[in-house]
Amino acid sequence: MKSLNHSIRQLFFKNNCILCSEKANDNLHYMCYNCHKSLRDKGKLKRFNDIYYLWNYDKKLKKIIEEYKFKNKLYIGELLFNLIGEELDKLMKKEKVDGIIPIPVSHKRLMERGFNQVEELLKFGRYSYIKSSRIKETKHMYELLNSEARRKNIKSAFKIEGLKGLKKVLIIDDIITTGSTMKEFITEIKNNNDTIQIVVFTLALSKTAKKINLKMR
């Protein structure tokens, strides 16, 4: 089915790299060899304070995530998973987590996009994960310019159950900027299980996070 979808896409659309517009590599389908190699070489597990991440959030990562998340190009999720899967496995073994929780999107965003971008990545890797809910409609964080507005926007936005018996969980998001979303999600988890240990992982970490010396705890 994958090869059939790719053949149809090649028939009707230009098969260009989503980052540089050069011809995509046939084996990669949506990215040229050079861009893919650059992402793979840079996408190694890193740590800033108590946050694990793979890439610095730059123009290339912004482009990939926007195409995937906001333009409903699910095939980019498979490409992304192929870049992150090995590093994610390393992290899970290193931290010995016994559960994964992707940050949820609101019902409205789910209806608009048709999918949760982080859950889709985990599905490509056939990972099991714990579902949670975003029970409050919030503005896009990039629309809010200061940390206090972001904090109020996301306050009491989440609901999660099913944490009984878990000792350590891995929370995953695609981008961390100021950390407001992640901190509020951690608060909800701790309200349900105050002894649970939490490991934070994001695909991309922003310059802002480093500038403010962001810490989750």
Image (cartoon, rainbow, N blue to C red):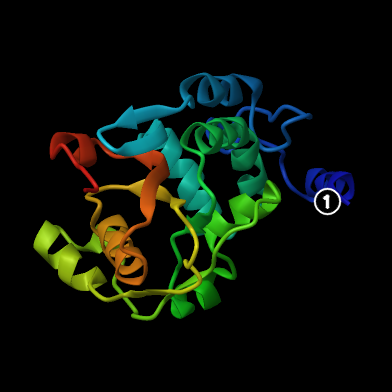
**Residue placed at 64% from the left, 26% from the top?**
32
Can the viewer see residue 140 in this picture? yes
What percent of the width, then of the height, locates residue 74? Answer: 64, 55
| Mark 1 lies on residue | 5
Q: Is residue 53 above or below residue 162?
A: above
Residue 143 lies left or right of residue 195; in this view the side is left
Residue 164 lies left or right of residue 143; in this view the side is right
**Residue placed at 53% from the left, 38% from the top?**
92
Counting every numbered tag in the picture gives 1
For the residue pair 129 and 5, the one nearer the viewer reads as 129
Residue 38 lies left or right of residue 202; in this view the side is right
What percent of the width, then of the height, locates residue 70? Answer: 49, 59
- Disc 1 crowd rating (10 Å Cα; few below 14, some 14-19, many 20+) is few
For the residue pair 7 and 86, the one nearer the viewer reads as 86
Q: Quadrant of residue 160?
A: bottom left
Can the viewer see residue 71 in this picture? no
Q: Quadrant of residue 105?
A: bottom left
For the residue pair 187 and 63, the one nearer the viewer reads as 187
What percent of the width, then of the height, locates residue 95? Answer: 46, 37
Residue 148 lies left or right of residue 150; in this view the side is left
Q: Is residue 68 above or below residue 63?
A: below
**Residue placed at 38% from the left, 81% from the top?**
135
What percent of the width, then of the height, locates residue 180? Answer: 23, 58
Q: Is residue 145 above or below residue 52?
A: below
Q: Quadrant of residue 213?
A: top left
**Residue placed at 67% from the left, 38% from the top?**
30
Secondary element under disc 1, as helix, strand or loop, is: helix
**Mark 1 belongs to which amino acid?**
Asn
